[in-house]
Amino acid sequence: MTKSTRECCTRIRVQHSRVNLVIDTYMHLISNSLNTTTFKNFRAYDLQVSWLKCVFKYASVLERLDIRLSKLGDMNRITKGMNELENFEKEATACVIKFL
C-alpha cells in the first residue's frame, strides 16, 4: 500500500470510525470482484473523494465507474473533485469514469 492510499484510508477511519470495520473487512473483495459500480449524489466532500480514491487504488478489476453528480452541490467544489479523481492513479488502468 502506498503512502497516498494509507492517507486516504486513514482519513476515512478518522472521520467515520464506524465504517472502519467495513473498510478493513471488504477491501479484499473490492480488489478482486468490483467490476462496475455507481456512486450517487456526488458533492465532492472530502470523505467522498477519499473513499473513491481508496476504491481506485484497490479495485484492480474495476472496468467502469459512473459518478452521478448532485444537483444541489457546489459546482466549484464538484469540478475540483472531478479533476482530482480524473488525475488520481488507478490500480485498474483501463477503468472508465463517467460523470453523469
Image: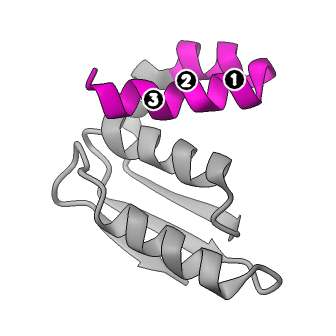
Q: Is residue 28 above or below residue 37?
A: above
Residue in the foreground of this view, choosing between 47 and 31: 47
Query: Which comes sooner in the sequence, label 3 or label 1?
Result: 3
Inspect this view and state whether residue 33 appears.
Answer: yes
Determine the image quadrant of residue 95.
Answer: bottom left
**Secondary element type, mark 1:** helix
Range of the magenta residues? 1-26
The image shows residue 46 at horizontal and vertical percentages of 63, 52
Q: Write the residue at 28% across / 20% down.
A: 1
- Tell me the kind of residue under disc 2: Thr
The residue where tag 2 is placed is 10
Q: What residue do we see at 22% from left, 42% from top? A: 91
Label 3: which secondary element: helix
Circle 3 sits on which residue? 7
Whole-number angstrom distance, CA of label 3 to CA of label 2: 5 Å
Alpha carbons under labels 3 and 1: distance apart: 10 Å
The answer for how far apart the CA atoms under marks 1 and 2 are is 6 Å
Residue 41 location in percent, x, y? 73, 69
Q: Most extreme residue toward the left, as rendered?
A: 93
Numbered circle sitting on residue 14: 1
